[in-house]
Image (cartoon, grey):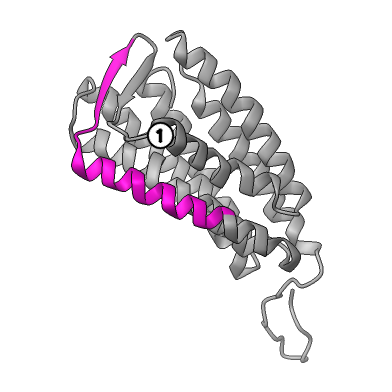
Amino acid sequence: MCWSAKADLVAGAGVLAVGAACVARTRRPADLPLAALPWLLGVHQIVESLVWAAGGGAGAATVTWAVIALPLLAVWVPAGVWCAAPPQARPRIAVLLAIGAATAAALAYALVAHPVTSEIRGHTVGYVVDLSHPQLVIAGYLVATVGSLLLSGDRGLLVLGVLVTVGALVCWTLWELEFVSTWCAVAAVSSVVLFFWVRGRDGEPGKRPYAGVTGGGSARP
């Protein structure tokens, strides 16, 4: 989320470009879900530019924003971490993925059973979703998403988890004060970190190189 429709649109396009670079650079199929995460975040910001343009409300852009932000990310992030994590970390990530799936189910039910609305509040957009036991759902969401990064067993994803935690606290404080929305900055920084994570995976053991063969019989990386 950014502070205006234009900011959301520009930031979303930039994050989409980083996402395309991440996917293009990926060599391990298991890394694709996390490599594609910036692409999803970019789409999310572009959708919010439509929320700004509509002046809020309960239209299709608001619902689409909520679907991506709530149930989809609650599963996507821990699932992506599980795919990319080293084998010894996967059992604990599987627990967090189960928490994310349960949280996503609760969020999806709330979106189906109740209307979701948005409201322009100065330089922020406020979203209202009717949740049962909101504290429990929010805790499950954070444990599944941020927790999976912190417990991934991968140094690059650990760094990403720390950055997301700090950035989210700052952005949430500014958003609660209705001062300015800066979540798009967290998305942009996270996307760049993921790009360097993908690039760093090229030289790690277990990489699957492309199997192109030249006329002389030598393999191309």
Q: Is residue 103 left or right of residue 82?
A: left
Residue 25, given in percent of the width and then of the height, sits at 63, 59
- Which residue occupies the foreground of this view, 26 or 212? 26
For badge 1, the amino acid type reads Gln
**Which residue is found at the position 49% from the left and 41% from the top?**
141
Position in image of residue 46 (x %, y %) = 36, 35
Q: Is residue 86 above or below residue 146?
A: below
Percent x, y of residue 136: 46, 36
Q: Nearer the viewer, residue 41 or 158?
A: 158
Viewer-side residue, 220 vs 7 = 7
The image position of residue 218, as x and y in percent, is 79, 86
The residue carrying pointer 1 sits among few (fewer than 14), some (14 to 19) or many (20 or more) residues within 10 Å by Cα, namely many
Quadrant assignment, res 124: top left
Label total for image: 1
Q: Tell me what residue is drawn at x 18 percent, y 33 percent.
A: 59
Quadrant for the C terminus in the image = bottom right
